[in-house]
Amino acid sequence: MNEEIWKQAEADADKFKDLSTQGGKDLSDLIKQASTVNKQIDVLEEEVKILKQKKNSYLFDLIPAKMAEMGMDKVEVNGNAVSLATFVSATMPKDPIQREQAILHLRDIGASDFIKNEVTVKFGVNEDNRARSIQSELEEKGMDTTARVWVEPSTLKKLVRERVENNQNIDMELFNAHVGQIAKIKGGKDE
């Protein structure tokens, strides 16, 4: 068996006969240059992240607070305008138990029209597909069903905005929901 290993090593050595010291150095330099570029990209991406956080601080906090303090909701100077607009953010909980609580809350407050449902039923050959209205009946008969229940992010934001504007009940904490002011700057890049 040792003879086979040596024969294989000799055969593999032939693959490297065209590799020169200069070729190895050139390859090493290219790898180092690629690594340097990767590090530069990481640094720049972090800088962009920090700049975006600063931008959001101005648009969501500092400018709206100063305009509110001055009793303004819009200002125009030399064709550039800054106005305040309401923003809403809300998300469905990721935790399955909290997600189910959120769905139940929407049903309890009469907002079930915003909930999407998807029911998948596995049938054999020559069987018809049935929808959500008979899901429980199918499960009672021992059929394998899978249901997906969700609310689209944009729909949830719209629902929160409408309920807050109309002074209707909605659990803001459950949806990690926030309503606030944002500065809209026209004439700049934020149009």
Image: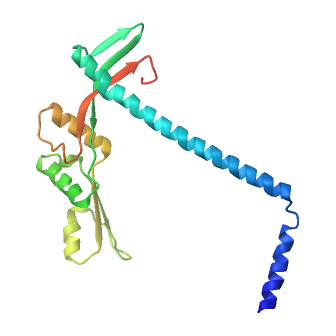
Judged from this view, the residue extending furthest toward the top is 78
Which quadrant of the rendered structure holds the C terminus?
A: top left
Image color mode: rainbow
> Does residue 49 sit above or below 104 in this rendering?
above
Measured from the top left, where is residue 100 in percent x and y?
20, 58
Q: At x 64% / y 49%, what residue is drawn?
A: 35
Measured along the vertical axis of the image, is residue 76 above or below residue 60?
A: above
Residue at 31%, 41% (x, y): give it. 154
Query: As displayed, is residue 162 above or below residue 42?
Result: above
Query: Residue 173, percent across and down?
Result: 19, 45
Residue 172 position by quadrant: top left
Q: State the residue at coordinates (29%, 55%).
A: 94
In this orientation, which residue lies closer to the viewer: 165 or 35? Answer: 35
Please give left or right for residue 69 compared with residue 123 in the image. Answer: left
| Residue 69 placement, left or right of 55 | left
Decide which of 117, 164 is in the foreground and name it: 164
Tally the numbered discs. 0
Q: Which quarter of the figure has residue 164?
A: top left
3, 186: nearer the viewer: 3
Q: Position of residue 9 (x, y in %)?
A: 81, 79
**Of the pair 50 and 140, the residue shown nearer to us:** 50
Quadrant (top left, top right, bottom left, bottom right) of the N terminus: bottom right
Residue 174 location (% of width, % of height): 19, 48
Of all residues, the one furthest to the bottom in this rendering is: 1
